[in-house]
Image: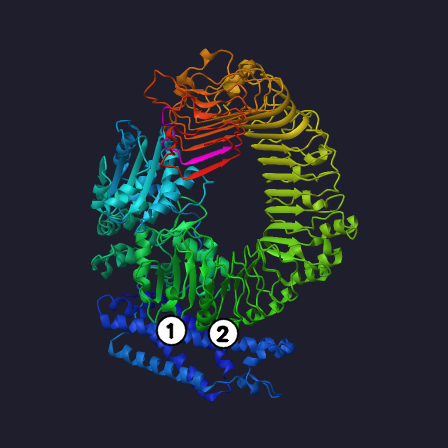
Amino acid sequence: MSVFGEAALSAFLELLSAKLLDSVLNFVADHRQVHQQLKLWQSILPEIKAVLNHAEEKQIKDEAVKNWLDDLQDLAYDVDDILDEFAYQELRLKLQKTQPQACTSKVQKLIPTCCTGGHFSPISFMFNAKMISKIKVITDRLNSLNTRRSSLGLSEIMSQGATSKGNKPRLQPTSLMDEAVEYVGRANEKQEMLELLKSNNSDGVCVLSIVGMGGMGKTTLAQLVYNDPSIKESFDHKSWVCVSDDFDAVNISKTILRSLDAESRDENDLNLLQVKLKEKLSGKRFLLVLDDIWNESYSDWTILRTPFGAGTKIIVTTRLEKVSSNVDSVKAFYLDKLSHHDCLSIFAQHALKARNFDGHLQFKEIGENIVRRCNGLPLAAKAIGSLLRTVQDHSEWEKINESEIWDLPEDPCGLIPALRLSYHYLPPHLKRCFAYCSIFPKDYEFEEEEIILLWRAEGFLQSKAKIQGKGLGNQYFQDLVSRSFFQRSGKDKSRFVMHDLMNDLAQSIAGEICCRLEDDKQSKFSLRTRHSAYVSDDGYHSVKKFEAFYQMTSLHTFLPLLHGKCRFYLTNVVVEDLFPRLSCLRVLSLRGCEIFDLPDFFENLKHLRYLNFSSTQINCLPDSLCTLYHLETLILRNCSKLKNLPSKIENLVNLHFLDISGADSIERMPSGFDQLTKLQTLSNFVIGEGDGHLIRELKNLSNLRGNFCLSGLENVNGQDVREAKLNGKLGIDGLELQWGADLENSTRKKEVEERVLDFLRPQKKLEQLIIENYGGVKFSSWIADSSFKNLSSLKLRNCKNCKSLPSVGRLPLLKDLSIIGFDQVQKIGVEFFGENQLNPFASLEILSFESLPNWKEWDTCEGDEKVLKLPSLRELSIKTCPQLLGRLPTHLPSLQKLEIHSCMSLVVSISSFPSLCELSIRGCAELVDDCSSPAKELSFLQTLSLSNISKFNIPADRTMLRFGKSEHFEIGGWEELASLSQHGFSLVGHRFITVGCCPQLQSLEAEEAELQPDKISRVESLMIVSCDRLNRLPQVLHELTFLTVMEIQGFRGLVSFTENNLPPNLKKLKIAGCENLKHLVDEKEDNKSMSSTLFLLKDLEIQNCASLMSLLSKGNKNICSQLQLLRIINCSKLSCLFSNTKFPITLKLLIIGGCPVLE
């Protein structure tokens, strides 16, 4: 049952009345028949609007009133379409008056003959028989509804809504709700779950389930446990999967695998996915949360859990007790309703921003009554509390407590009357916005801007105060967040999601007006459906899937939403035949669709406001697109083959948002941007060769805001840039100034580019600035002007002619500074910090230098003890600065990450970096730690990578102290290193070890006794490359139970592995360039079990081992029984692989080459 009509009609009808008053009546003034009809509409609509509050109350129990509202809603959409067509024609005629040349274009075909004569006037617009017939039908329907209004006894009453006082939007909230209120009342369950998860009393998979009805706090409890600090210490990996009602073992397995390995291939084969999962998790402690399971199939569950073994703990949340039984829970936690006290606490925090009512005694009694009606449900208490957050009138609290909505039965999909009530008391403009979001599937994560652009296209953002669309949309969006209708995603804090119950509520409200077409689900399309999303996992979409759309000719929204896919294939018939029929569309998206050519159908889509072709393969846009005079949003992001924007772009006078980021084939902008005065977002303005004057067209674009890029600046001169008035664009937060990469071009003049940069001075509230490929010798003074108090990020790239850096130390809030590709800079000194600057770089956290080939000296100006330089610096990176001499700054108390690459003249001292956690040195003159900091003040490194260091000048005991417990340990390119221990290094304490290109290295330890199994058992990966003199591997390899990946290259001392000295859980083994390797495993006659020999190995690769004859020395036993991938290349003496020549039945990929004697 849809209540979208009553939810939105108040705002909708007011909008329609405004449209009539604004211009339509004037436009049709000379056409008496049409004018009379519209005047009648204007008189009836307010009468109907006046009774909506009464209808909203009565429709709860009166089906006839509900039907009346449904009919009124349907009519309102049809009225809007008619009025919008009038507005379109009026705008078309207005544009033709100012651009008479347009009459020779395709647009002329649309103009009746009588409009092209000398006596042209608005009345000349042809109200043909079809249009007049539509208007009469609507008049009849409107009269009928007005008559029914009287018979239903609907009369005008004052608004019941606590916040429904007209359409004026609430002020944007100053903060989001405190999520801690969700945690009240579940402390005992949380503690018990933590104890069970951290215990080691299970040999197999341990499952805990959380069971409860919707809104009871199941997901919140799981999040509390999942994010508890003790979990990080108890598990090697953890993963969260939101399952919902789509229990797809392939997608679930892919999500888990991606959380373990972000670079894993996108497989759709469940067997391969599970094999990979088992490899990754073997020997690991793993926590998995499967949130919101609905699937009751035991067999599906057994298939999903197959890869998980000992060490895996799973938390399942579900509304269904049978699911808990199927998963064989060690313990099921049945969440009961919260106590009145706990529910009251949640309610008070959302309604009053307080833990209780002690400071608000006037609301205590009524508040307790409302909380009792929430029936112990935390989500209900939160929703109603959010509703009352700004309400100070006691009578409004009373109205909510006494509402009839509390008495409605809970419907089959679990909707709670309290949630209906929270919706009921939304202002009308928010009701429309929320109901519209029912087109999104459950668990769909969305960005704020994405939703606001859609709302604007649908006409939901209307303000008498003339607030700009996005500002108004931001108010609406944050209002819904503050009322708990939207909540932040747990995965990505920049995105939002609707709770499942809120999604159910939105669907119940929207009814047949909004509909989702989903794979394998029955959709409730009707002729009244206006907004639709197409949700699919399938990559190919045939005509049959879209048959329902052919009947919905009044559709306003066509929006594909793809789960986990960035591309899909749409048959040409749909593009060429279906879309032209949907002539009422406001929103059309083909994002990610594999289309190359667009049919010329836009003349049929005159109502379009939103057009999204992101990530398609289109190479041009048809000229008819420029007849979309209402178009507000055009998204061409990542259209890599698109070469040009349409030439008549000046006709898109309502365009607010144009995104061409990633459309790198566009070489120039067409003229006409000066007419797009409503443009707020323009990702990039590209100035082509010979088009320098077009930058002047930016002068009129005073509403630009957000991030803006100017590229092709080598094609402009100073006077043209001055006319662009960049410093008048007060809304621009991030600015990128981009010249062409070819600085050697003879047409480029240094003096001209310096003058251009002078005139590109932006407004003073700028937050981010990028300058790239600038050809001048010096920078403009404004770049280091301390008046840029908000500038937090500055990136200067490939300014190869500049001989010095600007004095950016003056910028008070600069946090991120990147200097790349300055060929002429030889010294960085006082000019960089700012002369006489008392506190330079006070806020700087990240500093990067890269590709300064002639930089020789860094004067850190540390002689003046009164000045503390770089006090907040957390990350310092210097790469490819081969002539840089001397030392780094000596006192960086906050430095956590240091990268020095290819700086072969630099002395690197880490003496005064007590907070250092990550160190990567790949080429320097000397590494020093002079022990100036006491040991107790030093932090342990987490990541260590050392290579190509000419002189290592750190005492062995200090090395052990600073580097001994780093998880990632990598050394390489040490010509003189004979053993790890000579510098204090050890295999002990690390998880991932790489040793490479150490030609003199003979031993991994001075004494084998140092390699105690209990000390090195943490090792998970071991890689040894090109250590020619290394004579043996550690003799305790068989004790490394966590070792799963091993790679050995260029190890002459390797003849074979002894049978009992192989890691028991090894999954991947690569051996290459080991010229003396004869057998992979040396079998022993007296060992029959071979319990430790490569039984779990899945991936084996052997290359360029000229002496290899067989995998087994005697060939008597089967090994590698689980092998899936086998590659053997250039092993000229190999004659036998497996005993009895039988391959493992698990083998999926076999590659053999360069093995001439293999049988």
Q: In which quarter of the view is residue 642 placed?
A: bottom right
**Residue 511 as seen in the image, left or right of residue 583:** left
Q: Is residue 180 above or below residue 667?
A: above
**Distance between mark 1 and mark 2 Cα atoms:** 22 Å
Amino acid under label 1?
A: Ala
- Can residue 16 be seen? yes
Which quadrant, please, contains the C terminus?
Answer: top left
Point 63% across, 79% down: residue: 104
Label 1 CA crowd tier, 10 Å (few <14, some 14–19, many 20+): many
Task: Tell me the magenta residue range.
Answer: 1116-1129
The residue that mark 1 highlights is 76
Mark on residue 604?
2
- Residue 238 in picture, x, y percent from top left: 37, 36
- Can residue 168 be seen? no
Point 61% across, 24% down: residue: 973
Instruction: Tell me which label, 1 or 2, sits earlier in the chain.
Output: 1
Badge 1 element? helix
Q: Is residue 880 above or below residue 141?
A: above
Badge 2 element? helix
- Residue 1042 in picture, x, y percent from top left: 40, 26
Q: In which quarter of the view is residue 793 placed?
A: top right
